Amino acid sequence: MSPRRPLGVRLLNRASRAARKLGVAPPLDPASLKRQAERTTGLNDWNADDHDIFDEGLSTLCAAVEAPPVLNGLGRLALHLHLLRALSTRLQRIAAGPIHGTLQGPVLVVVGLPRSGTTYLHRLLAQAPGARALRLWEVQHPIAPSSGTDRRRARAQRSLSTFARLAPEIEAKHATSVDAPEECFFLLDDALVTPSFPLMFPVEHYRQWRHTAPVKDAYRSYRSHLLRLAKSTPDRRLVLKAPGHAEHLTAIAEALPEAVFVHTHRDPVVTVPSRASLVASFHGQFTDHLDLHALGQSCLDDAVHLLRGSRHGRASLPAHRLINVEYASLIEHPAATVARIHASARLPMPPDFRRFLVNAPRNMSRPRHVYAAADFGLSEHAIKTAVTAAQPA
């Protein structure tokens, strides 16, 4: 049984249900959202290289909101705020103008199935001298205000603290903090081709659309964010991580020629239900009609798309741009794994960093994450059958 929601959330959800029944619920539609972003930023130029896919993505996402499972009041509010942040970032990016240049390399990019050790490995690699990981508040708010006080970190902290109170079990599934190294897929949000929306919200039609949408223009926009973020530390190389990049290796490899991809591997029989458990914690806050079995099938479908795209992308990458890491080896021998990655990427391993790795904890101190595939209508046989079809011998 899910924990009882706070009184304020229950009242918000009740008011939202009543408004929908009366037909007076404020719509989540592209035109209204754009107008609000324009008022928020004082900007109004939406045109960029990714304009067509942006419009399609925004329309698809807004339409998905009205399909089952219905978002509750908290879900509609949270999605509205997330979209407003993404649209405001887009206006700011376009107003800032094009940015060119190269990144200090090599840029290590950790990819692979979600729940395959990507977070643990990313945080180890980020500790290396000269490395620069992007923090949670940076990826959520990548463009600094042109004037006034910079409140980006404070806004991210409020959002994180609020959700931690609503879903305390997240600590066991994906512990983070506002200053922790975080996934860079948020930098795709303002192009509206991003995994962040289906991760957080049950927007099934958008989730399906995203797997077929062209992403080359979105990754060019993503690169512009990286160039701006890296300007403050030009002598340090970025260390990035987003499991979903594995689905689009060809596009990100073209947009980011400085990248060397570190691809983690773990049995999908374990990773798929683990991710389903994480996604359920997000979706469960934002809908009162969560179907765990449908969620499990969606997570399996996501894994199949990732593996299929990864197979295609890996085949086109030269050997020096791809480093494979098995989950078991990472957990049992983290120092040796990181040393091998650095050697393959021709990066130094200073003695101090070697000592740090030897003494680094293998698991973050947090409650145990407990889940079962059957909770999500999944079985070992079904998962193996689906992923085998995506990865033929």
Image (tube, rainbow, N blue to C red):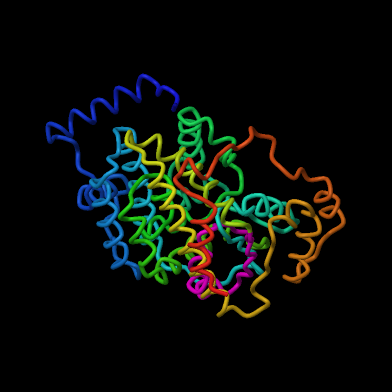
Whether 240 is among the magenta residues is: yes
Q: Decide which of 264, 382 is in the foreground and name it.
A: 382
Q: Residue at position x 48%, y 31% from top?
A: 167
Q: Quadrant of the N terminus?
A: top left
Which residue occupies the extreme front position in the image?
Answer: 381
In the rendered structure, the answer to whether residue 217 lies left or right of residue 393 reads left
Q: Residue at position x 60%, y 37% from top?
A: 369
In percent of width and height, residue 106 lies at 66, 69
In percent of width and height, residue 287 lies at 34, 36
| The magenta segment | 238-265
Q: Residue at position x 33%, y 23% from top?
A: 10
Q: Decide which of 38, 189 is in the foreground and name it.
A: 189
In this picture, is 103 found above or below 156? below
In percent of width and height, residue 153 lies at 51, 40
In this picture, is 195 found above or below 1? below
In this picture, is 261 found above or below 73? below
Q: Residue at position x 36%, y 67% from top?
A: 212
Q: Quadrant of the C terminus?
A: bottom right
Q: Decide which of 304, 106 is in the foreground and name it.
A: 304
Whether 344 is among the magenta residues is: no
In percent of width and height, residue 64 lies at 27, 51
In the rendered structure, the answer to whether residue 334 lies left or right of residue 280 reads right
In the rendered structure, the answer to whether residue 130 lies left or right of residue 311 reads right
